[in-house]
Structures are given as structure tokens and as C-alpha cells.
């Protein structure tokens, strides 16, 4: 097992790692719309989704993987009515035939009152 840590994504805000490499996979913790400097991205769900995807991308690159190798994601939304907007932006990060398995759920609240959080599992 190896801990992944990059300065190109926000640091963990709790007792967890940005990601863990184990068994040929990268397990990325949920990312919210924090920038690497710790500031929150614009409050709109579109801007937040873009920041979340950029954070995941940075963690995956540090681990030696990429969005092209993602096999599973989970999207957490504070409002399921944002599904279409999030889905459009999320989908733009996965080109070609590589579309990971996914679950999307509405939750009552997310850290720092953001609108979206996404985690993922990727191959190395």
C-alpha cells in the first residue's frame, strides 16, 4: 500500500489520504470544489464540478494513473436536480469508449456546504 499526496489538489481536511495505491488500483478519496490553495471554487454547481474533476485528475496523475483509467466513480449531490448539469460536465472528462461504472446519490449535506463530491477508483 502506498499513500498518494500532491500539492496540485487540496490537502485532506480530515484523517484520510488524497488517495491510496493498492493491488494495482488507485482509490481516490472524495474531492470537493476546493482549490489546491484551500479556497472554495465558485458556488455554482458547474464550476464546482469542474474543480472536483480537476482535483481528481491531479491526484490520479500523481499516482501514475489518469482519468482514462477510472473504472468506478461515486457522485454525491446535495440536490439531485443538479444531476443534468453535473452529468454534462462529468461526461466531458471521459472521452471515447472509457465510461466508468458509476453511482449517483443525493445526500443531505456535504463538507463546506458544497454541491458536489466525487470519488473514484482507477487502474494504474
Image (spheres, helix red, strand yellow):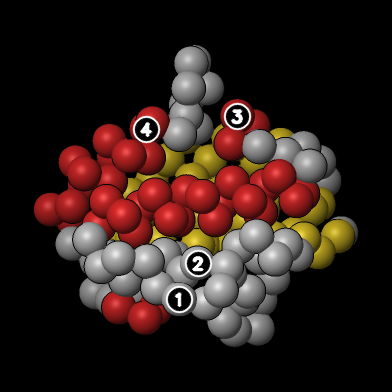
Spatial separation of the CA atoms under disc 4 and disc 2: 21 Å
Quadrant of the frame with the C terminus: top right
User: Can residue 118 be seen from the camera position used here?
Assistant: no
Say which label, 3 or 1, has the lower sequence index: 1
Q: Name the mark nearer the viewer: 4 or 2.
A: 2
Rendered image quadrant of residue 32: bottom left
Image coords of residue 8 (percent x, y): 65, 60
Q: Which residue is mark 1?
A: 39
As helix, strand or loop, the secondary structure at mark 3 comes to helix
Tell me whether the residue at label 3 lies in contact with that at label 2, contact meaning CB atoms closer than 8 angstroms: no
Q: Which residue is mark 3?
A: 68
Quadrant of the frame with the N terminus: bottom right
**Residue located 48% across and 22% down the image:** 95
Q: Which residue is mark 4?
A: 91
Image coords of residue 52 (percent x, y): 45, 56
User: Which mark, by number, is residue 35?
Assistant: 2
**Residue located 36% across and 52% down the image:** 49
Image coords of residue 31 (percent x, y): 50, 62
Residue that sits furthest to the bottom in the current view: 14
Looking at the image, residue 68 lies above or below residue 14: above
As helix, strand or loop, the secondary structure at mark 1 comes to loop
Tell me whether the residue at label 1 lies in contact with that at label 4, contact meaning CB atoms closer than 8 angstroms: no
Spatial separation of the CA atoms under disc 3 and disc 2: 22 Å
Tell me whether the residue at label 2 lies in contact with that at label 1, contact meaning CB atoms closer than 8 angstroms: yes
Spatial separation of the CA atoms under disc 3 and disc 1: 27 Å
Amino acid at each position: 500500500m502506498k499513500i498518494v499526496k500532491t500539492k496540485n489538489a487540496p490537502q485532506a481536511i480530515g484523517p484520510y489520504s488524497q488517495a491510496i495505491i493498492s493491488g494495482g488500483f488507485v482509490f481516490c478519496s472524495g474531492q470537493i470544489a476546493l482549490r489546491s490553495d484551500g479556497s472554495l471554487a465558485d458556488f455554482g454547481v458547474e464550476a464546482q464540478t469542474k474543480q472536483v474533476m480537476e482535483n481528481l485528475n491531479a491526484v490520479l496523475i500523481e499516482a501514475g494513473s489518469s482519468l482514462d483509467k477510472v473504472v468506478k466513480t461515486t457522485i454525491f449531490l446535495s440536490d439531485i436536480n443538479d444531476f443534468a448539469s453535473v452529468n454534462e460536465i462529468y461526461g466531458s472528462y471521459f472521452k471515447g469508449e472509457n465510461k466508468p461504472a458509476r453511482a449517483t446519490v443525493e445526500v443531505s449535506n456535504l463538507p463546506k456546504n458544497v454541491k458536489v463530491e466525487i470519488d473514484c477508483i482507477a487502474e494504474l
